[in-house]
Structure formats: structure tokens, C-alpha cells
Amino acid sequence: MGADHSNRFDRRTLLGCAAAGLGALAMPSLARAQEGTTEMMPPVNSPVRNNISSFRMLDWQPYFSSLRNGAVLVDLTSRALHFWSEDGQTYLLFPTSVPLSDDLTRRGRTEVVQKVVAPPWRPTPSMKERNPEWPDVVAGGAPDNPLGTHALYLSWTYYRIHGTHDTRKIGRRSSNGCIGLYNEHIQQLFPLAKVGTQVLLI
């Protein structure tokens, strides 16, 4: 499934989603804003996803000095990724997976240094030490590839913003350090983010 540019909205509009069940497509839905706080609404006739938290729309100014090359803010507490385009007209808000533990968590400023479609996955040396039975590499495009369909590589070694085929992970502490998105969402973010897009994890 490619990027759906019809799901891009102006900066005052929130793109939320909820998906039901493993393997289900994340279905975009407009969320309602009330006094600056937004709760994602599940699709009609869809069970509520208990692992997705409430989101709050944010302005970029407290976090970035400009929107040069666009900006990504990952809030590890609310498990949400915010994206603002360079012209300030596109604002996206997606649920994410976050690292399993504090020792796997990194905060601070980085940037996108590479964009990869169908990225191969290789466990880090520490992951391989903890899990020696894991393969040395999983080919890009494989259904069990932990990086999903697309990945944004960050300037921090081994850190990525990427998709996932396991939709149960989104909204939870479930990663080994990376930030995971539904495949449908990384496919929307991927063409908008640039090499050089600012990234801040808080």
C-alpha cells in the first residue's frame, strides 16, 4: 500500500487512527479537538484499541527554532509522533511503539540521514548477545521483518523510525530502541520527511 496523499491535512487538522486486530489496516479518522486535547476515535463498529493512548495536538515552536526541512517530535510518554512540514501546512500525528525500558531509550536531537524502502533488518550486537538465536539479517520485504515496509534512519547509530507488521506493538513499550509506526503511517510520513528533517525525542 503506497502513501495516500489524500490523508494530508493542514496544520490545524489532526490525522488519527485506530485499527482493530492483528494484521488489520490502520484506518485514518478525523479526531475531535476539545480545549486543545484530542482523543482518537475508533472507526465505527471497531473495538477500542486499549494500547493506544489519548493524544494532544502540539505546536512546533516550543521544540524547534524553525521548520527547516520539516520537523518530527516523538513524545515517548504519550507514545505519539508529531510531524510538521517545512511550510507549516501539513501536521500529522501518529501513535507509536516506544522502547521497552529506560536503558534502551534515547532522548534528544537527531535528524533523518537516510530513507530506505523495504529495509533489511540486522540485530545490533547487544541484541544478538541477548538473543543469540536471532538471525543475522532479515531481508527487506520479508513478512517477519521488524522494520516493516519503510524506515527513516537517524544520525544515532542503530536508531530508526520505521513501520511494523506486528500492529499489536503500536501504543506500547515494545521496541529495542526504535520508534515504530503502523506501516500505513510510515508510508504517509516517508515521502514528506527529507534527509535532514529534524527529529527530537522527548
Image (tube, rainbow, N blue to C red):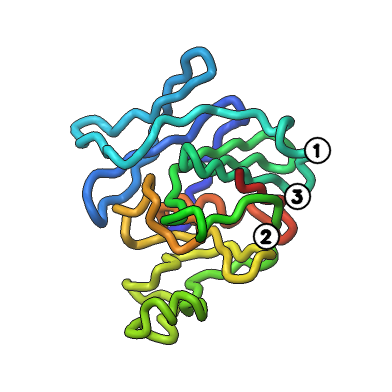
Q: Amino acid at mark 3?
A: Asn
Identity of the residue furthest to the front in this view: 103
The mark that comes first in sequence, 2 or 1, is 1
Q: Amino acid at mark 2?
A: Val
Residue shown at the point (71%, 46%) measured from the top left: 70
Q: Position of residue 137 (x, y in %)?
A: 44, 84
**96 displayed left or right of 49:** right
Q: Secondary structure at mark 3?
A: loop
**For residue 51, what is the image quadrant?**
top left
**For residue 30, what is the image quadrant?**
top left
**For residue 11, what is the image quadrant?**
top right
Residue shown at the point (48%, 49%) measured from the top left: 4
Q: Position of residue 62 (x, y in %)?
A: 72, 31
Give the labeled residue for mark 1: 65
Give the labeled residue for mark 2: 112
User: Residue 69 bears which disc, if any?
Assistant: 3
Give me the C-alpha separation between circle 1 and circle 3. 12 Å
Q: How many numbered marks are there?
A: 3
Q: Say few, some or many: other residues with alpha carbon within 10 Å of mark 2 (under 14 / 14 to 19 / 20 or more).
A: many
Q: Position of residue 183 (x, y in %)?
A: 41, 57
